[in-house]
Amino acid sequence: MKKHHAFVLTAVLALSTLVGCGKASDPEATANTGGNSSEPQSENNEKAAETVKIKYLVPGTEPKDYKEVYQKVNEKLAADGVGVEVEKVYIPWDAWDQKLNLMLSTGEEFDLFHVMQDRTPFSSYYNRGALADISDAIDKYGENLKKSIPDDILDGAKINGNYYVVPSYWVEMASEGQFNIRRDILRENNLEEPKTPEELISAWEVVMKNWKGSNKPYLGTRADFDPIFLHTSMLHRTYDTFPFTVKDKFFYVNQNGEIKSWIETEEFKKDASFMRELYTKGITNPDILVMKQEQVDAQLDSGEWFVRLGTGGSLNGLKKYNPEATVDDIGVVWFNPEKEYMRPLTFKNGNAVPVNSKNPEAAVKFMDWMLASQENYDLVQYGIEGEHYTKDGEKGFKPIRDPENNNNSRYRGSDSQNGNVNFMRFDLETSIPDNNKVLFEPNLNAINSIAANFVFDPTNVRTEYTNILSEASASITPIYMGVQEYDKAFPAALEKMKKAGLEKVMAEYQLQFEAYQASQK
């Protein structure tokens, strides 16, 4: 990553800590809305344009005080002369993909939506013709975006030199490849921290047998076949062929530029074997193939877990199972920590404007405004100071908890959806120090995958690409999740994938990637 990237992270995060969302600081926080002028002025002292209302789609559950907070957000936007009013629309996680795809395909009007690169990358929406080119809007209205997001990350948001998404610069992507483990549970069972996948499974069997909670500490995840989405990439550090990554679910790419069909690799088979062992030993939920994200989140939030792929958790969750738990009771484990650390993507999440939006400039103005000041960021992410949070030093915050809201604050935004490390605040009392270090401090020794910024355009194989996505969900996911035995199920599944067009898609990917590599020299 660029020196600028590392410098900003170092300077901003040295005092910080939290898990998966952000923080920040400001002399006057949050809900000072002002708004006395009858003719609001913009930052360059021009008279503000007529207010445009935009609709912003995000996955998740609407916070209790969302309407109150966004009334303040819109008052502040008006006082600052931005000329934008925002309505945020929450779609439940289990309905997100289906609902969003339907809205995009039917041309329903909205102006901004959240993108998860490790779930459905922005290139997938672009390849469907669903994204607006926002280059002109960023050039004209994106001063704060450009100032707060490093160039190398912004470059990853381009296709053919044009912007189609605004990245969220909220996490160190070299965190991919590790997992969380409960140190309090290790102590409870007289176990050492596992150093290999085999030791992990052995320890997990002991924990499952001795668990004192009301629900078993299953592996908390939904089903898929993409190791980046699932974070089963933690296994890859144990393979002789590492470093490599899996791009867009289907494409194995190593640092020598070698491309393979992911599901046909030995690495896929090894991953599936590990997952099969988890499944047959009762470590994954027997209903794993139909688990919804809300069910997974409920288990993890309950504190009844032992291992969590990726990072997450908080002291509040741990205490539900172990009242004596501390923030040091979640540890970060890397298999073969002496190996290189690699960023599979330059950014993890972002926000895009659909092609049917009538207000693409307004959407960019809102995202830019949020990064114009600490005050703006705090309001969007943490709510109203004194009502939803209080500041805790320069970079910390304390949520004001409501016993009638499961002891959570009545409002919380999402740093992972549209956050920025230059402004993020951290709950210093309950967030996990080891996670904060991995997620929010720069890894100066990490490398970028040579495919991190490569965008595959399946236009020439659109039918085949659509078909293999559908077929893989039906035929490959049960194998990868260990529900079906690889040796018995894979040959028939591979035949179905080839009939769906896998080989044609692979050839097109190879062609485009070679052209991309040539362009980088």
Image (cartoon, rainbow, N blue to C red):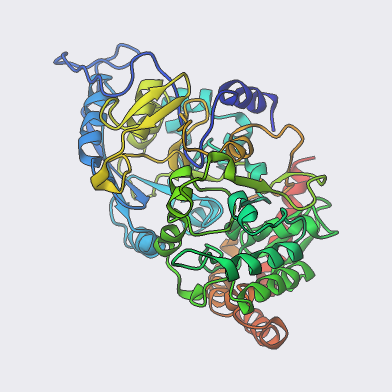
The reply, left or right, for residue 186 in relation to residue 360 is right
Q: As drawn, which residue projects farthest toward the left?
A: 38
Front residue of 203/120: it is 203
The reply, left or right, for residue 279 in relation to residue 422 is right
Rendering coords of residue 425 (x, y %): 46, 29
Front residue of 99/69: it is 69
Q: Quadrant of the N terminus?
A: top right
Task: Reply above or below: 102 against 426.
Answer: below
Q: Quadrant of residue 393?
A: top left
Rendering coords of residue 130 (x, y %): 43, 54
Front residue of 520/316: it is 316
Front residue of 458/236: it is 236
Q: Does residue 456 appear in the picture of this structure?
A: no
Q: Quadrant of residue 476?
A: bottom right
Task: Reply above or below: 430 against 61.
Answer: above
Rendering coords of residue 23 (x, y %): 45, 30
At 70% from the left edge and 62% from the top edge, which residue is drawn?
200
Rendering coords of residue 350 (x, y %): 48, 43
At 65% from the left edge and 71% from the top edge, which residue is drawn?
275
At 47% from the left edge and 19% from the top edge, which residue is drawn?
394
Task: Reply above or below: 36 against 116.
Answer: above
